[in-house]
Amino acid sequence: VEEARLIYEGVSRLLPQSDERRLVIDIGGRSTEFILGHQLTAETTDSLRVGSVAWSLKYFADGTFTDKNLQRAEIAAESFLDAVAPVYKRANWDVAYGASGTVGAVAEVLGYAGFDENKITREGLAWLRHQLIKAKTVDKLSLNGLKDDRKSVIGGGLSILIGIFDLLKLDELIVAKGALRHGLLYDLLADEQDAPQDLCDASITSLTTRFGVNKKHAQNVDIVALKFFDAVAYALKAPDHISDESNHLELAKPCQILSWAAQCHEIGAAISHSELQKHGAYILDNTELMGFTQTELHRLGLLVLGHCGKLKKLDVDFNDDRFITKLVSLRLAVIFCHSRNMPVLKNIVFERAENTFMLSLPRAWQQAFPQTCYLLEEEILSWQKTNWNLVVKSLD
């Protein structure tokens, strides 16, 4: 039961915030976990002694695959799991997720074969089953994406997975990113008295430390970016819909996303100061951070990519009101902090009207900080090449 709870914890932390009721299935080597939950809470858990290793030893001990022994293994798995089927029937959940282990291995093979790597379907399972029968033996089984240490247990794992699909009448199983180790790590962080309260915060702190980010400068950019964002947040338009991950993200934690982007906007400098924004975005697109989905990391990467440089080459939706507001706030913060000191912001006014951002600066301030004014002039030109405008006015 504890293992199942931790698995659900790991899975749910890496899913976008949602009101959906979730079924999480994890087929391990010795056992299979079933969890029903809502948001971050596991409400019903079961752990059954049927796993890919045990099933492979029992039904595929000689290393051969036939339609007959696969069918026997599938029926046996279905019979073994039948006792909990009423609890996990379709009416009790909205979306079914598969975590790590067998699910991850099968999804990777199916992805290489041209199927959607983010979900497992009946069609994909039927194809994989046919490949095993065609190969006849483990030794002759050659599938792109199937690691050597998985070959000997793929028969057992696949049989259990097919049995679950048939028993629960599943059409598809979404591949979850998190699992037991993610849940365990979150538990450890939560148990530490001085640990960060949020797994995402802990991950960003770890990332910036690993890439040698100047924490003081990053903090200054963070503070200034949030000040600019807060000043014009009143003008944000509500998203048209909230069905995908990015919109759940925008509604749940818009300020945190901007803050995280500010904190790690210079991680690319560890590779090279030249085009550091591109290196930073690449790092975020090709890493795994506890607490973040790949969609969230990509959104962070887009902000990091856009924190400086040409806007015209930025492959983003310039009609995305919320993203653009965060982007302009971050770019202005980087400009104002260019001397790597906390800037003087007293009497500076930042406003917005439709697609125009207006920055009002006291004349005395402009005389005191001519370098910043020059950078702002360049920034005005950058925004003129988009459907947005940045205007700088003088205050007497």
Image (spheres, rainbow, N blue to C red):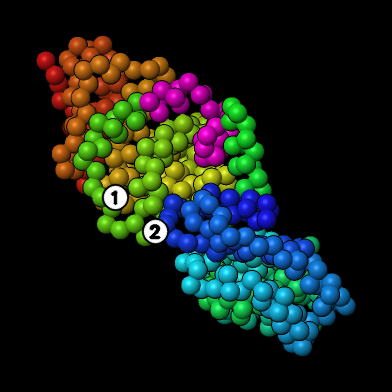
Q: Which residues are magenta?
A: 196-223
**Residue at point 58% right, 50% down?**
9
Spatial CA distance of label 1 from label 2 is 14 Å
Q: Which corner quadrant of the image does residue 310 belong to?
A: top left
Which residue is depicted at the point 19% across and 43% down? Answer: 355
The answer to whether any part of residue 150 appears in the image is no
Considering only order in the chain, which callout, 2 or 1, is on the residue closer to the N terminus? 2
> Can residue 115 be found in the magenta stretch?
no
Residue 59: percent from the left, percent from the top? Answer: 82, 78
Looking at the figure, which quarter contains the C terminus? top left
Mark 2 element type: loop
Q: Residue at 62% x, 47% y: name it.
A: 183
The answer to which of 345 and 26 lies nearer the viewer is: 26
Q: Work out which residue is located at the far right of the displayed protein and give it.
A: 62
- Amino acid type indicated by mark 2: Asp
Is residue 216 one of those drawn in magenta?
Answer: yes
Estimate the x, y position of residue 261 in percent, counting from the top left.
43, 37
Q: Main secondary structure of the magenta part?
A: helix
227 w.r.t. 149: above or below = above
Using the image, tell me which numbered label, if any, was put on residue 244.
2
Return the residue at label 1.
320
Residue depicted at 68% across the width and 68% down the height? 144
| Number of residues whose C-alpha sits closer than 10 Å to that of mark 2, classed few (under 14), some (14–19) or many (20 or more) | few
